[in-house]
Amino acid sequence: MAGVILPRFYGCYNCRKPVARHDDIVSKYFVAGHRKRAFLFSHVVNVVAGPKEDRRLITGVHMVADVHCSDCGKVLGWRYEKVYEEAHKYKEDKTVLVKYKIVKLDW
């Protein structure tokens, strides 16, 4: 299949279940707790959202839900359920995955 470009996937660091496509990254400039790099994705798969809660993040208070791998249950990041400040509305319904909790699959 010469010339065919296959999508690049990220998987759970623990069980390697595919969770996101590289092409769905909205931003690579997010920060998780303790200055850990994180990526904002427009679409993720094979994750389960936990309970929604208001949480104070670097950019203010947002309603978020932790996202867990659907296979092994490890927390991989969080989903923005509701964003209160207009300047950050682009994050709503998107998911942040912490970089060290995802691995490249077959790149």
Image: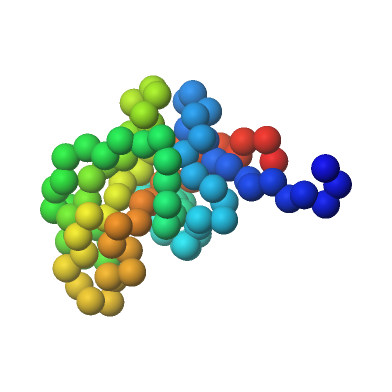
Q: Give the number of marks.
A: 0
Locate residue 90: give its quadrant: bottom left
Q: Is residue 79 left or right of residue 36?
A: left
- Which residue in the rendered view is the most extreme toward the front? 1
Left or right: residue 59 versus residue 2 is: left
Tell me which residue sits at (38%, 51%) in the image.
Answer: 96
Residue at 50%, 57% (x, y): give it: 25
* Residue 91 seen in render: yes
Q: Position of residue 7 (x, y in %)?
A: 64, 47
**Where in the figure is residue 92, as x and y percent of width and height?**
28, 62
Quadrant where the image shows the C terminus: top right
**Residue farthest toward the bottom in the current orientation of the protein:** 87
Name the residue furthest left: 54
**Towards the viewer: 98 or 12:** 12
| 36 sits to left or right of 63 | right
Asked whether residue 56 is in view, the answer is no
x and y, in percent, of residue 20 in the image: 49, 44
Q: Quadrant of the N terminus?
A: top right
- Left or right, 49 with reference to 24: left
On screen, 26 above or below 5? below
User: Residue at the location (42% across, 41% down)?
Assistant: 45
Name which quarter of the figure residue 60 lies in: bottom left
Say which of 33 and 107 sits in front.
Answer: 107
x 51%, y 35%: residue: 18
The image's colour scheme reads rainbow
